[in-house]
Image (spheres, helix red, strand yellow):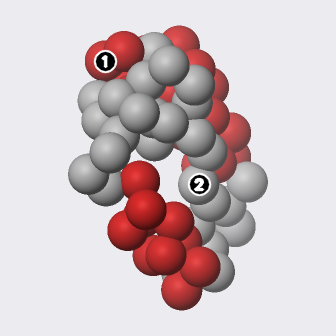
Amino acid sequence: MGDQDVMFLEPVKNLVKEHKNSILKVLESCGHVVNVEKPDQFNHLSVAFIKNQQ
């Protein structure tokens, strides 16, 4: 998520606490659409997460 996502960041932080298989990464200078604003970072983090799943 982006650090400037004022609508969804806080609720997602709480959701991640409940879902033990989830990971929250917050990208700086980003809003709600992280995959569009910072696609390289988003893809890198997404692929790394998928590769770590068993």
Residue at mark 1: 36
The answer to whether 9 appears left or right of 19 in the picture is left
Q: Amino acid at mark 2?
A: Leu
Front residue (pair 3, 17) = 3
Count of all numbered marks drawn on residues in the image: 2
Dot 2: few (<14), some (14–19), or many (≥20) neighbours within 10 Å? Answer: few
Q: Amino acid at mark 1?
A: Val
Q: Secondary structure at mark 2?
A: loop
Residue at mark 2: 24
Quarter of the rendering containing residue 26 = top right
Front residue (pair 19, 17) = 17
- Which part of the image, by quadrant, shows the C terminus? bottom right
Quarter of the rendering containing residue 31 = top left
Identify the residue at horizontal 62%, vertical 34% (top origin).
45
Identify the residue at horizontal 57%, vertical 30% (top origin).
27
Q: Position of residue 25 (x, y in %)?
A: 61, 45
Q: CA distance from mark 1 to mark 2?
A: 17 Å
